[in-house]
Image: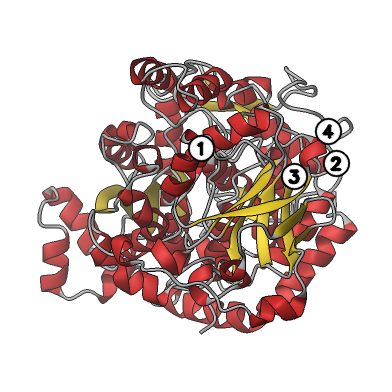
Amino acid sequence: MSAHARIAAITNRIVERSKPTRERYLERLRAAASQGVNRSVLGCANLAHGFAVCSPAEKDALAGDRVPNLGIITAYNDMLSAHQPFETYPAVIREAAAQAGGIAQVAGGVPAMCDGVTQGQPGMELSLFSRDLIAMAAGVGLSHNMFDAALFLGVCDKIVPGLVIAALSFGHLPAIFIPAGPMTSGLPNDEKSRVRQLFAEGKVGRAELLEAESKSYHGPGTCTFYGTANSNQMLMEIMGFHMPGSSFINPGTPLREALTREAAKRALAITALGNEFTPAGEMIDERSVVNGVVGLHATGGSTNHTMHLVAMARAGGIVLTWQDIAELSELIPLLARVYPNGLADVNHFQAAGGMGFLIKELLKQGLVHDDVRTVFGQGLEAYTVDAQLGENGAVVRQPSPEKSHDPKVLASIETPFQANGGLKMLRGNLGKAVIKISAVKAERHIIEAPAIVFHSQQELQDAFKEGKLNRDFVAVVRFQGPKANGMPELHKLTPPLGVLQDRGFRVALLTDGRMSGASGKVPAAIHVTPEAVDGGPIARIKDGDIIRLDAIRGTLEVLVDAADMAEREPVTIDLSDNEFGMGRELFAPFRHAVGPSDQGASVLFHAH
């Protein structure tokens, strides 16, 4: 089915806007691809270093450019539950490659921090910047020019976007992303949230909180709520970087390993040495990017991707804007209810029909482009499947179910949970912002209340503990943008604001920081740009100013006379405490060079 008329129109607008940058990108990509197999340009000494540890047979094959060599970029570490399974992947990939007549080498490792560990801690101020650093680190690994295709092992928040930027920067090479899957279900996410709120109110102690958290985050795999990590996996599948049906298979299962082996063999088949050459930069185009945005809306995905998708697209010469994302939001119904947008976890989503069912439903009404290239071949229709383990241990695929196995978790296109995905853009005299309302009750989509201004998360936490916040208000937490302190997630504000909302107060958050993929039931206008450190209007707000957040009309305003606002001097604060400790001094160049949120909050791609 051809794309819906408005989907096609938005896509065409992106194509036209992107022509200058996309054409330059493709020229560079094709020039690199025309050089042939990369090892042919290496001198003898260079090549000898590159295959020094290989077997004699491998050296002979690599010397003659007869056999494709896969470069593995791994984000393995054994602190991240989602990345711990990657420890064994290189051996599995090397074995699978050898069986298919190829070779695989680990080209490099990239850093991978856990936002769950660093929430509310100084290390969180490195998190967003780690995305661009990961892209650079992956680029270093691939710069050895030894490889015919790249395999990327990464799952979590900034890691996958950083790896995508690298994959598109080396877009003359085919690229396949190999996931590790979600951990098995533990303590239900709503129960974990309940205990967090009880702890915030002082009704349970640290021991009870730690017990609940440990029962929730209990083994290998991604956290099971639908935050940025699982949004990443959805994106990689709907954009065609994953093998069909591979995103949400649990670690340590025979099917998980079979999918890894299959991905390695497929990577060999799509190199320039084969008949299905699929360079990543040619494969991913404006239609692929639009499919990613559609998937984000249809699943109620992470707010972080309003920045990541912009930066990822720009790595391929494609100029995506918040306006594009906002207009697509109005067209795409919400088809998934996964916590925090519902009670189910991502394993329930998979059991209900998963990505295959979701894509099939979107295709019914032309809400995604089918005429795209993927690592599996031509057309997104090939992803409307359920991956299973065959009798011989290989992957087999069956058509996705005709009906959802659990309509409370995964809806049909005819009976969506709501008319749009709930990820909206806000505009007004405070600038631009993002809000996610898929988990916010309808009666709280408009909040008008006095501002209470804070310059740190801790200030708000302290005010809550002192009982100063038992009223209607909009918490303005500023100087949390990328230039100020790296734009940390402010997820630790969710429990106290949730408590106040449950007490009947009308509360909201307004910040130039982030709230993460776990943004929940409290209305939060986030990613405000211009940020406070740039003298944006948010820096002129005073305690008591009336803030109106209207997620229905898409507006964000301070109800103050324009002349009065213009006369106010933007507040400045001493940010020196954010400049040192836990590695923050190393990222000073990033804080100085970073672009605004609506351009991806990147040091790599933004208008200077």
User: Amino acid type of disc 1?
Assistant: Phe
**Pair 1/4: label in front:** 1
Q: Quadrant of residue 484?
A: bottom left
Q: Quadrant of residue 559?
A: bottom right
> Can the viewer see residue 464 in this picture?
yes
Pointer 3 or 4: first along the chain? 4
User: Amino acid type of disc 4?
Assistant: Pro
Label 1–label 2 contact, CB within 8 A:
no
Q: Secondary structure at mark 2?
A: loop
Whole-Å distance between the Cαs marked 1 and 4? 38 Å
> Can the viewer see residue 247 in this picture?
no
Task: Tell which of 501 and 42 is nearer to you.
Answer: 501
Pointer 1 or 4: first along the chain? 4
Label 4–label 2 contact, CB within 8 A:
yes
User: Amino acid type of disc 2?
Assistant: Ala
Whole-Å distance between the Cαs marked 1 and 3? 28 Å
**Pair 1/2: label in front:** 1
Task: Tell which of 326 and 82 is nearer to you.
Answer: 326
Task: Tell which of 599 and 501 is nearer to you.
Answer: 501
Task: Return the residue at label 4.
Answer: 416
Provide residue 167's location: percent of width, then percent of height: 44, 60
Give me the disc on residue 419: 2
Task: Return the residue at label 1.
Answer: 464
Whole-Å distance between the Cαs marked 2 and 3? 9 Å
Task: Return the residue at label 3.
Answer: 422
Is 250 on the left or on the right of 439, as rendered? left
Q: Secondary structure at mark 1?
A: helix
